Amino acid sequence: MSSSSFKSSVSVTHITTATAILQIDDVTFLTDPVFGPAGVEHDITHLFPDAKEPLVTSSMEDPALGLHELPPIDSVLLSHEDHCDNLDPVGRQLLDGRHVVTTMDGAKNLAPRPGVHGIKPWEQQTHFIRGVKYEITGTPCVHLPGGEVTGFILHTAAFAHSADGRPNAIWVTGDTVYLEELKQMKQKFHIMLAVMNLGAAKVMPPGHSEPLQITMSGGDAARLVREIGIERIVPIHFEAWHHFTEMGKDLRQTFEKEGILEKVSFVVPGVQSKIL
């Protein structure tokens, strides 16, 4: 059941892949800044220690917005800083002098930026962002082996609580496969909105005989909607890169088959869409 006590206004502007503006009342969050043009090759050899030759990847689409078109950004939610489809050289410019929440490793790697804060899985931190008190909780992620990734649960006073006393909250999943551990979220939060990184991304690590799935599929998302009791989802992270195996059409079909399509808001890249 949706919560009538939730008084905030929430909109999402998808930019590319995992990059989105999350506007909550007067506070503007940005997720995983990627703003480089399509076709730029990124060396990813370091992500695969057993690689015998250089490995590169590139985006197939330009971001829907450029840096010069962004509103003032109050906080960056950075799921991980070591993958080029979550933070590229152009997007990295946004981190200087900015409030950032990311992984513990990410905070070390981005030092000495004083505005960068590392968060652990299920750790709850208090942050004052544009004068508004936010409780931010890290959520566990499993992505490409060898790296840290985090998701984020956001709660502020204006979100209020559900009828059973749980805090109403917004969840930004980060890059992750389905995890049983995520189900415990239901005991602690009433998730009004989940911005979900999907695409069923797959890679073929050197020496492996089968592709490795590193982000959730539409079926995984539907399962979490039911298990956690998520009110609404915004799917992102399913276009623009070759390693995605489920695109928008595939996701829509899956959500319809799973009976959750009415809970899904597909947003047009570059267009601010009011969700709550």
Image (cartoon, rainbow, N blue to C red):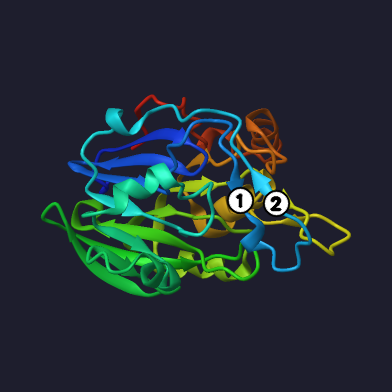
Sequence-earlier tag: 1 or 2:
1
Residue 171 versus residue 210: which sits nearer the camera?
Answer: 210
Image quarter for residue 69? top left
Residue displayed at 22% across by 67% down: 114
The residue singled out by tag 2 in the image is 55
User: Residue 6: where, in percent of width, then height?
Assistant: 27, 47
**Label 1: how many Cα within 10 Å (few below 14, some 14–19, many 20+):** some
Mark 1 lies on residue: 43
Residue 165 visible at all: no
- Kindly give the residue lying farthest to the left in the view shown: 131
- What distance separates the C-alpha of mark 1 from that of mark 2? 6 Å
Side of 260 relative to 157 (left or right): right
The reply to whether residue 221 is in sight is yes
Q: Quadrant of the C terminus?
A: top left
Residue type of the residue flagged with mark 1: Asp
Q: Secondary structure at mark 2?
A: loop
- Indicate whether 112 appears above or below 77: below
Report the amino acid beneath label 2.
Leu
Q: Along the horizontal axis of the image, is 23 left or right of 170?
A: left
Mark 1 touches mark 2? (CB < 8 Å): yes
Secondary structure of the residue carrying tag 1 is strand
- In depth, the one of 180 and 120 nearer the eye is 120
> Where residue 266 sits in the image (x, y, percent)?
51, 30
- Residue 142 percent location from the top left of the image: 60, 65
Residue visible at 59% across and 40% down? 41
